[in-house]
């Protein structure tokens, strides 16, 4: 299943801060005629029951979600570029193109796209392959309405959205990541900042964990983005995991 939240502002900056961080609430929706924010959500799944469930869940929330459905990864890959979504919740096991393969292709074409896997799988390989493909979250089915909507909002704000099983797998993976050395490599402190970032920690939590100020964290991130040639947290996270985690 794929669920995506469209920002309705093609080609524009989604409210990034000075270091590329997406500010809370930025890029999550377009303005409705009544002045409220609307989040467009699209579902891609071969099972109509999933479409109906998603409609019920997002309609029950009452916060202005609009839904679009797709029936395959191939269809999503063809149509998503014109939909310009902000967030995608994607199933892994679909006929034809898998959700992981679809994610990889989508991120290559739409680097700002936020993908959260929404799947019945919870094995280590599925979790790590999804993150390496560019997903910024991993939520297992079944999930409550509140958890699913929270995942969409967190992903839209450039934060990780991980279920407990995915948190454990990603944490263990990051614990084994070593430093790289040489020209352009991250310093020890920059490496520590990226490990925190890859765990989905917010700037204030990174600062508290490392015993530094938030301004210092922002300064480190500005340097990290330049070294990794990244524009925001999600892109930096993907590049960091690929370079330092052997992905």
Image (cartoon, rainbow, N blue to C red):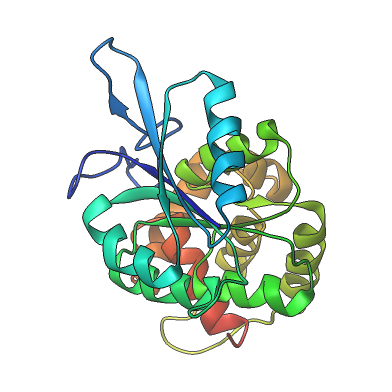
Left or right of 47 on screen, residue 107:
left
Above or below — where is 132 with respect to 51?
Answer: below
Which residue is at the front of the view, 79 or 198?
Answer: 79
**Whole-percent x, y for residue 115 in the image:** 49, 58
Left or right of 10 on screen, residue 92:
right
Identify the residue at horizontal 72%, vertical 71% (top origin). Answer: 174
Left or right of 54 on screen, residue 42:
left
Quarter of the figure with the N terminus:
bottom right
Residue 227 visible in the picture: no
Left or right of 120 on screen, residue 194:
left
Which residue is at the front of the view, 213 or 9?
Answer: 9
Above or below — where is 153 with respect to 60?
Answer: below
**Whole-percent x, y for residue 70 in the image:** 41, 56
Above or below — where is 206 with respect to 74?
Answer: above
Residue found at the far top of this picture = 34
**Whole-percent x, y for residue 61 in the image:** 57, 22
Quarter of the image for residue 211 reads top right
**Whole-percent x, y for residue 198 in the image:** 61, 61
Residue found at the far front of this picture = 48
Residue 144 visible in the picture: yes
Identify the residue at horizontal 72%, vertical 80% (top origin). Answer: 125
């Amino acid at each position: 299943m794929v669920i995506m939240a469209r920002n309705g502002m093609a080609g524009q900056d989604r409210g990034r801060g000075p270091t590329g961080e997406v500010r809370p609430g930025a890029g999550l929706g377009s303005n409705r005629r009544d002045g409220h924010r609307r989040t467009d959500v699209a579902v891609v799944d071969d099972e109509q029951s999933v479409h109906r469930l998603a409609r019920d869940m997002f309609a029950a929330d009452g916060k202005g979600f609009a839904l679009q459905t797709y029936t395959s990864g191939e269809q999503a890959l063809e149509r998503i570029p014109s939909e310009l979504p902000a967030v995608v919740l994607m199933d892994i096991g679909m006929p034809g193109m898998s959700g992981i393969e679809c994610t990889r292709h989508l991120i290559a074409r739409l680097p700002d796209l936020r993908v959260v896997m929404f799947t019945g799988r919870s094995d280590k390989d599925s979790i790590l392959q999804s993150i390496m493909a560019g997903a910024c979250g991993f939520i297992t089915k079944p999930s409550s309405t509140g958890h699913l909507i929270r995942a969409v909002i967190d992903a839209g704000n450039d934060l990780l959205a991980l279920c407990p099983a995915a948190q454990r797998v990603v944490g263990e993976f990051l614990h084994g990541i070593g430093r790289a050395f040489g020209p352009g490599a991250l310093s020890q402190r920059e490496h520590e900042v990226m490990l925190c970032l890859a765990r989905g920690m917010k700037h204030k939590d990174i600062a508290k964990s490392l015993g530094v100020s938030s301004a210092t964290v922002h300064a480190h991130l500005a340097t990290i983005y330049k070294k990794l040639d990244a524009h925001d947290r999600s892109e930096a996270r993907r590049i960091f995991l690929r370079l330092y985690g052997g992905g």
